[in-house]
Amino acid sequence: MSRISDATITRLSQYYRSLASLEEGGQEMVSSMALARKHGVTPAQVRKDLSCFGQFGTRGLGYSVCQLKETIARILGLHRIWNVALVGAGSLGSALISYKEFKRQGFHIVAVFDNDLDKVGKKRRGLTILDIRRLPQMVKKLDINLAIIAVPKDAAQSVADLLIKAGLKMILNFAPISLKASPGITIRNVNMAIELEALSYRLVADKSFRPGNNPQLTPV
Amino acid sequence: MSRISDATITRLSQYYRSLASLEEGGQEMVSSMALARKHGVTPAQVRKDLSCFGQFGTRGLGYSVCQLKETIARILGLHRIWNVALVGAGSLGSALISYKEFKRQGFHIVAVFDNDLDKVGKKRRGLTILDIRRLPQMVKKLDINLAIIAVPKDAAQSVADLLIKAGLKMILNFAPISLKASPGITIRNVNMAIELEALSYRLVADKSFRPGNNPQLTPV
DNA sequence: GTCTGTGAAGAGTTTCACAGCT
DNA sequence: AGCTGTGAAACTCTTCACAGAC
């Protein structure tokens, strides 16, 4: 029972977006070649990714845009609405509430929590900020499936513990600290600073040292 | 000349954060084992990652916390200030301006651009929003090294083209569309919706089909 | 004894190349 | 002919295991 790689899932999400726009454009069939070119991957990669889940194409013709789109939606769980809890009503949290792409894919932020009692009771883009202590109760009441953490670094771990205690198993963490997942819990860390650091690494590397064409870096 | 993997660079960024907190705690030496445990990787992985850049440890003792931290800072380019341009003064853009972790690592957002003339001239957390048409001029004037895209999906590609035309080579894209990089240009795509989709995939997969313990998914 | 640095082995992912269907 | 589906090959990344330094 080979587990499917994260890379494959990420690519399926991307194919899905292309298929949606092809469908809008009225195209009926698409080949692995055409799809691959849009995403800078090989056609074989597209076919392998899809073949993890079944056989969806027709030899000689390609894939039905509409059918393939619906199939990927079912694989990724985009055919339904997910209720999402957001913890952290700061500026990043507020931005996430109004982030269109979440809603478009069926992720509805149905509750916002914060531990700052000055914020509790106030509104953020139509949602009333709730006391974090009401989390367990609201997870049940609103049938929440997923959680997003958008709090400062130092609060992130304790928020994650609270979410897990409230029964949530899937967490998307935007705090700049890597939270480790215990068994049965999935945490995805999005660290925006680390993304920038990968770019600045290249900026430095392009100019000066780069393994192979430079002497080894010496300790400071 | 083996290129260093993105995974290695990401881990270095993470080690760096641990080292900073160890240094604050006054610890002088750290072993690959201790560092590894904090990040859920193997000690061999830590040593391999570091060995890409040189030999920084002492056998029998481990690594000097302070020296290793400084060395990683130099590798990643965190020993200096980078000037960053932000395009898109919406709610995500505004959140990024006040994102502490950027400043902490030396990424200073020095200019914000938008194409909405209603916004141009207004302020966002101390920065005056500039007309996107002034981008080329400001890139030179402010010595901008990196750019962040935080505009709606449909505008992202044309913004990227503008940035590249203005001479920028490193772009962090938050718009929910994967921008492809031409040669010499590096674009990192952070798609927050795709991160959630990876979680919802697992939520679906855990319950129902999962390759191996279920019949193959049939086309819709 | 402790712990690093690294070649070799192992695991995982991507690409190749071709059989087989339309 | 055109294109998928898939074993096998190639490649990449991770882990093992041990020589060598302290």
Image (cartoon, coloured by chain):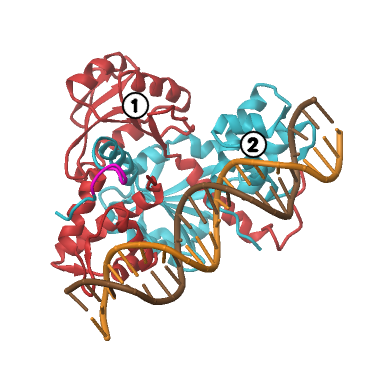
Chain colours: A red, B cyan, C brown, D orange
Characterize the magenta stretch by its predominant secondary structure: loop
Question: Which residue is painted at 39% across and 22% down in the image?
Answer: A159
Q: Which mark is residue A202?
A: none
Q: Position of residue B52 (x, y in %)?
A: 67, 51
Q: Chain under label 2? A: B
Question: How far, Cα to Cα, is label 1 from label 2?
Answer: 34 Å
Quarter of the image where the C terminus of chain B is located:
bottom left
Residue range corresponding to the magenta coloring: B210-215
**Label 1 neighbourhood size at 10 Å, few (<14), some (14-19), many (20+)?**
many
In the image, is residue A126 above or below residue A213?
Answer: above
Question: Which residue is painted at 69% across and 42% down in the image?
Answer: B71
Pointer 2 residue: B43
Asked whether the viewer can see residue A132, the reply is yes
Q: How many marks?
A: 2
Helix, strand or loop status at disc 1 = loop
Near-viewer residue (B77 or A10): A10
In the image, is residue A23 above or below residue A117?
Answer: below
Given the image, on which type of amino acid does mark 2 rest? Pro
Near-viewer residue (A155 or B142): A155
